[in-house]
Structures are given as C-alpha cells and as structure tokens.
Amino acid sequence: MSDFSVIIPCYHDDEKLASLLSQLQNVPHRPMEVVVVDGANDPACRQVSRRYGARWLAGEPCRGRQLLAGAALAQGDVLWFLHADSRLPPDPMKAMRLAIAQGAVGGYFRFRFDGPRAWPALLLEPAIAFRCRFGVPYGDQGLFMTRQVYVETGGHSPWPLFEEVSLVRELRRLGRFLALREPLFVDPRRWHRDGWWRRTWMNRNLALAFARGVTPGELAVRYRSPAN
C-alpha cells in the first residue's frame, strides 16, 4: 500500500487552510503526512499547520517554487498536490490508491464548483472536463502522481502560474494519467466576485496568452490585477 504525502501551497488563506487540514484529518484513509508551504511566511499559517499536525515550511510567494519545495521535503511514495481552498470528496485516498494499484502514474479529480453554485456551473463543469481530457487539468483538481515519475519529469515549473503544464504533459508521455470520477470541490469565490462568464473568459485569455509565449510572471501580474 502506497504512502501519500499531501503538499499544500498557501498564501494568506489561513481560514481555508484550516478547513482543508481538518478534512484531511477526518477522511477514512488518512495520508502519511501533510506539508504546507507558506509563501507569505505568516505566523498565523504556521500556527494553523501545527494545530492540525501538518509540517510547515516557509517558501517564496511563487506557487511553482512552493510546490517544488514541498515535494522535496515530502517522504511519501505518492505526492498529492492540493490548493488550500479545496473541499474533499468523502474518501479521496481510496480512489487514488486504486488508480495507482491499477498501474496509473497519477491522475486528477473531476472539477466541481463548491457552493453556492449558480446555473452557469452546470455548463462550465462538463466543458472543463472536456478541456482536461484533451488539454491540461490544472492544480485546483488535486493532481497526484508517484514520487518516481515526479522526479523523472523534473516536477513543477518554478513559475507563479501554469506551473503544472509541462509536468502533466510529461506524465501523460510516461504512462496512464487518469481522470477520476470523484469530484474535488473548487471555491467559486472568484467567479462570484467577477461574474461567471467574465471570470471564465479571463482565465481562457490567460491560457491563450501563455500558449502564445507570454511569460508566467507577466501573466501572474495580470491575474492579480483588480481588472482580473
């Protein structure tokens, strides 16, 4: 049976992090360890991590570098990367263990918006599933993989955005990278704040700009700007 290490990059999201760490303590099959990589080097984040028995590591405010640092510290044979604002399905470990036991190098969970949901979610979720099948699932879908293939691929790119793109492409080249039926619930706060269609349009524009060669650093500035 594989030992799982969970790696969570965090940046001023302590309330959401506390909820996720609590969930990880209460799933039927618990991971071997949880590593939180704090891009803000915030004492509050460190306190939350310790309260729930997670290992805390100060990191740079760059998600790709945070993920690389967490993976380097983790001890498990399977690495599971989660965003701090995720909500878990009832038994995520069982689904991942089954995928690895069947020979997959890794995989990702089905994208589902958490509540409160609006009717556009019913259209966007299958569209995202279709994109992931033929494109790249992003980090908010709980990417997991064996440590061996993570090392072979070189891991995440040291970028603030799109850090998983080359990793997923290499994983698919090396073996079966499975789409699980189980959902991982994604916080819809940015869609509520910006509008469901406007937020989706902005995300697609960022992806298209990345495909055209705009640097992840420049795209991160756009992503964080009030207009985005």
Image (cartoon, grey):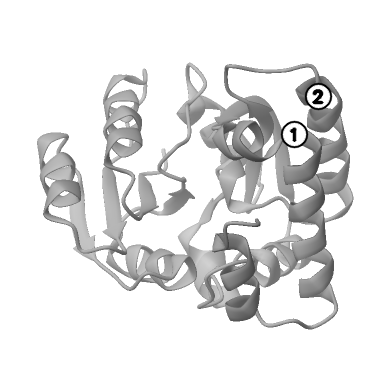
Residue 157 falls left or right of residue 72: right
Q: Is mark 2 on a helix, strand or loop?
A: helix
Do the numbered discs 1 and 2 sit on residues whose CB atoms are within 8 Å?
Answer: yes
Quadrant for the C terminus, please.
Answer: bottom right
Q: Image quadrant of residue 215?
A: bottom right
Q: Position of residue 170 (x, y in %)?
A: 71, 70
Q: Residue 196 carries which label?
A: 1
Q: What element carries label 1?
A: helix
Amino acid carrying label 1: it is Trp
Instruction: Give the total of numbered labels.
Output: 2
Q: Position of residue 175 (x, y in %)?
A: 73, 59
Residue 124 falls left or right of residue 228: right
Q: Position of residue 6 (x, y in %)?
A: 37, 46
Write the residue at 67% across / 27% down: 112
Sequence-first tag of 1 and 2: 2
Label 2: which residue? 120
Q: Image quadrant of residue 43?
A: bottom left
**Mark 2 neighbour density, 10 Å: few (under 14) some (14–19) many (20 or more):** few
Alpha carbon distance from label 1 to label 2: 7 Å
